[in-house]
């Protein structure tokens, strides 16, 4: 009888566990975790500011090094090139591009949907009132970010295609500058940049992800590292879950901690955090299903070089 992809995945996971045990026994497992993150990696930022991961990894004889990236795509490119071992949360779109490039990724954890934490913005004085009016307009966003898929989905709902707009691939910082000087007709961005633009620049939300894009964020590791150090990933998962609950239960304290790190007012940080679920959960075949829909949408727009089986990937299983 032909085995299913999930049976194959389970077998690979078992082999990975055996390999990890051998590596640990031989003492040649990685002793430094190179962790990549971006500004919007809220839970990782809290853990870094509190020094929690260093404390929890010390008994395992593991050191930690931090590596900041402007957005999710360069972050996973670094993971693919073995320049980092673990990636903090990236939007659900980003792994699809990495998989198309042949990256060997293991999905470690997922944050439950936060559809209102990304949106298409226009300036307060813009005459644009609907997504349909973006036809022929210049729209800025970070390539392969969650907002990229939000834009595609919003255009499709309005009867347009990606070819109907003039895309401008920009980092969040460059996008904000271009948006404010009027060289973009619209800007698609995620929190905390979204809330900052609303509060500081009076930006108006044209549409957010509600009913269009779930916006689930994923934590990933190179499969090589996941097989060698499942103990490290177990610690990371546990602390992410705890930190997610703490941020939601202590919104003002969390905002005060993050505000200087992000260079934003605490009120902006609190608004941004209010739109993110921060509900960390295991990645299962069921809750990863939207990944294929995202991959197929990018392929249809000729933005992916080839079709990928977005859901046939190794999934880390936290203990307990």
Image (cartoon, rainbow, N blue to C red):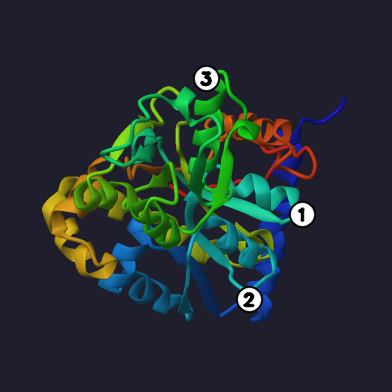
Q: Which residue carries the number 2 mark?
A: 29
Near mark 1 (Cα within 10 A), the count class, few <14, some 14-19 or many ≥20, is: few
Quadrant of residue 261 in the image? bottom left
Secondary element under disc 1, as helix, strand or loop, is loop
Quadrant of residue 54 in the image? bottom left
Q: Which residue is drawn at 42% across and 44% down?
A: 187
Q: Which residue is drawn at 78% across and 37% down?
A: 307
Secondary element under disc 3, as helix, strand or loop, is helix
Please name whichever residue, 105 or 20, is drawn nearer the observer in this view of the structure.
105
Q: Choose the circle earlier in sequence order: 3 or 2.
A: 2
Query: What mark, if any, has residue 157 been given in the picture?
Result: 3
User: Is the residue under label 1 in contact with that under label 2 (CB below 8 Å)?
Assistant: no
Q: Which residue is drawn at 24% across and 45% down?
A: 198
Which-is-in-front pick, marks 3 and 1?
A: 3
Q: Can residue 239 be seen in this view?
A: no
Q: Is residue 160 visible?
A: yes
The x and y percentages for residue 38 are 44, 63
Horizontal placement of 93 versus 206: left or right? right
């Amino acid at each position: 009888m032909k085995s299913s992809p999930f049976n194959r995945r389970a077998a690979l996971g078992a082999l990975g566990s055996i390999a990890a045990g051998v590596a640990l026994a031989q003492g040649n497992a990685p002793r430094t975790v190179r962790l990549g993150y971006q500004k919007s990696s809220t839970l990782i930022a809290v853990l870094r500011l509190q020094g929690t991961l260093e404390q929890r990894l010390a008994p395992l004889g593991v050191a930690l090094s931090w590596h900041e990236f402007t957005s999710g795509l360069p972050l996973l490119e670094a993971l693919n090139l073995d320049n980092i071992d673990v990636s903090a949360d990236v939007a659900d779109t980003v792994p699809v591009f990495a998989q198309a490039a042949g990256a060997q990724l293991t999905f470690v954890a997922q944050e439950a949907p936060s559809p209102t934490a990304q949106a298409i913005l226009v300036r307060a004085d813009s005459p644009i009132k609907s997504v349909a009016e973006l036809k022929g307009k210049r729209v800025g966003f970070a390539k392969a970010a969650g907002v990229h898929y939000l834009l595609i989905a919003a255009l499709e709902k309005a009867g347009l295609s990606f070819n109907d707009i003039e895309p401008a691939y920009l980092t969040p910082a460059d996008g904000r500058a271009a948006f404010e000087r009027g060289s973009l007709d619209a800007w698609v961005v995620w929190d905390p940049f979204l809330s900052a633009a609303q509060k500081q620049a009076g930006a108006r939300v044209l549409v957010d992800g509600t009913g269009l894009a779930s916006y689930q964020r994923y934590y990933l590791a190179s499969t090589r590292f996941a097989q060698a150090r499942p103990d490290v990933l177990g610690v990371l998962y546990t602390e992410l879950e705890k930190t997610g609950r703490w941020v939601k239960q202590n919104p003002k304290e969390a905002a005060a901690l993050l505000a200087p790190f992000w260079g934003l007012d605490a009120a902006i940080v609190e608004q941004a955090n209010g739109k993110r679920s921060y509900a960390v959960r295991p990645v299962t075949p069921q809750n990863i299903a939207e990944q294929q829909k995202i991959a197929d949408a990018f392929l249809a727009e000729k933005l992916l070089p080839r079709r990928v089986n977005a859901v046939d990937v190794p999934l880390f299983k936290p203990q307990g």
